[in-house]
Amino acid sequence: MQPVIHASLHGNAFVIEEAGYLALRAYLDRAAAQLSADPDRDEILGDLEQAIADKCARHLGPHKSVVTAAEMAQVLAEMGPVGTPAEVGPDAPAAPRAAPAAGERRLYRVLEGGKLAGLCNGLGAYFGLDANLVRAIFVVLALLTHGAWLLVYLVLVFVVPAAGTPEERAAARGLPFSAQALVDEAKRHYATLEQELQGPWARWRASWSSGTREARRQAREAASAARGAWQDQRATWGAAAPTAPPAGPPPIPPPHSSSVPPPIPPTAPPPSWPAPPPVPPAPPPARYARQVAAALMVPVVAFWGSALLVAEGVCAALLIANGRILGWSPGLPLWGSLVILMLLGALLRRPIAAAGAALRRAPATPLSWLPVWEAAFWIGFVALFGSLAWTFTPELRSLAHDLPGAWAKVLASWHASH
Amino acid sequence: MPPDLDRFSAIRKGLLEYLVLKIVAGDKVYAADILGKLGGTEFATQEGTLYPLLSKLRRAELLDYQWVESEAGPPRKYYRLTAKGRSWLGELNAYWKTLHATVDRMGE
């Protein structure tokens, strides 16, 4: 049994299997993006829909009312990619891909990566915050309200719907949804999965060599783009030849060295033929350079992140042992100071976590070795700062030696304030 | 198509406009006729390419279409050349002959 979707193609109603519908939608989305610069976009899309409808109708009969996914795939393969290879006239604009419009953002519970019901995760996605920060705020609120906040949490869990479909998951983050985006995402996941299956060293080597390959490819592309542009220019000059009066000596092949375009007769100028092929799009921004920059920034981020983490631990140890930090007393019960310390730490670490996330996102191709590189620096810096703190902070040592005692101290401060 | 000839796909693509104009010049046709005539030749084309091309030729006022009711199904677009398209096709024909002659003569 297959779920089906009713769809109207240029005014013709069709029942299509869901997978087929997604493929159709991806095709039309991509066509719309390809034709975004075309003044007749809507008309062409209508023609395409009509052609798809005609082809689909061929697969239907008196006892067959549903277009299967396989049939839709065949239909779309027959249609071919929507593009304008012949759209080469000087008046014809290149068809840039439409920038995806930012999708509408809605509040959902996002179970993917959620801890309990995905509520904090969804709230984080909605407000653009780290889900862990939202969780910390919820825990603090629950403590401060003696648990009453848990009721709010429960109510919200029942009120806020879970993001079930891919569309909803995209809306939870305010991302534009298109079936094509889904397909691309699936492909990316597959690529990373493939790399996960290899060892870290093989992964590192693969991404390194693909990085250099990528750089070489970019250089080649830039060179051929420049060559292409030059040839296009020559072709344009040659294009005026056919409009020269037919009488007289046999026409001269397009000039090779002349840099002056032959004059075009005043009669109706040729609209576009034989015009130059479209100039290839500019090569993508240098991903390789960005990968190198990301790799160089990782130690800096790890340095500050681990320094903050160790400093937080030292402050907590000082608070528990002495009730004050370097002579400064917060004037709060111990548990309150610790909570505030944790919140403060989370807040201070936020920009660093954001910087780390930005680094991981920076290259357009996922860098599988970047997390390894990052982890190495984090472990190194935490070990360095940790050993320094261990040596120079006796409070930290005593905390480590008597964890139950420290916990009893925190609990006692909680009971004393109630 | 042998892989070596794939490199000449730019030539085929460049000639497509000329061929479509030739087909439309022959008779009033609709898109499926054009695809049918191109199909099976080196210039076999799909809807995804043809429709944007037809739209562009119409914008250049080289061809025009009219809606024709059909017994089965919705009305169809029937394409025909405009006067401008006809004169342009004449120029293209002449240019094609000279190109062909140049290519044939080369190296003799």
Image: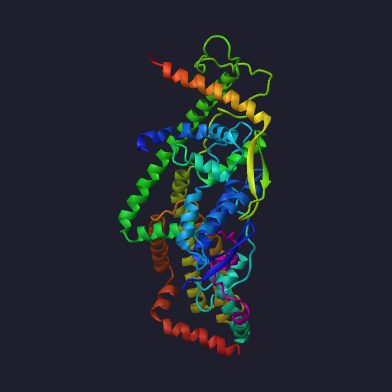
Report x, y in % for residue A16. 53, 65
Determine the residue positioned at 59% across, 80% down. A157
Q: Is residue A63 above or below residue B88?
A: below
Q: State how the image is colored.
A: rainbow
Determine the residue positioned at 57% across, 50% down. A31
Determine the residue positioned at 40% across, 77% down. A400
Report x, y in % for residue A311. 49, 66
Nearer to us in this view, A165 or A335:
A165
| Residue A177 in sight | yes
In which quadrant is the C terminus of chain A drawn?
A: bottom right
Looking at the image, the residue that sits furthest to the top is A248
Q: Is residue A104 above or below residue A404?
A: above
Q: Which image quarter: residue A244? A: top right
The question of residue A160 being in magenta is answered with: yes
Q: Which image quarter: residue B53? A: top right
Q: Is residue A349 above or below residue A269?
A: below
Left or right of A385 in this view: A39: right
Nearer to us in this view, B89 or A38:
B89
Nearer to us in this view, A311 or A264:
A264
Looking at the image, the residue that sits furthest to the front is B71
Q: Is residue A327 above or below residue A198?
A: below
The question of residue A55 being in magenta is answered with: no
Determine the residue positioned at 55% across, 81% down. A335
Nearer to us in this view, A364 or A100:
A100
Report x, y in % for residue A144. 62, 82
| Residue A363 in sight | no
Q: How many marks?
A: 0
Report x, y in % for residue A159. 63, 80
Q: Which residues are magenta?
A: A156-179
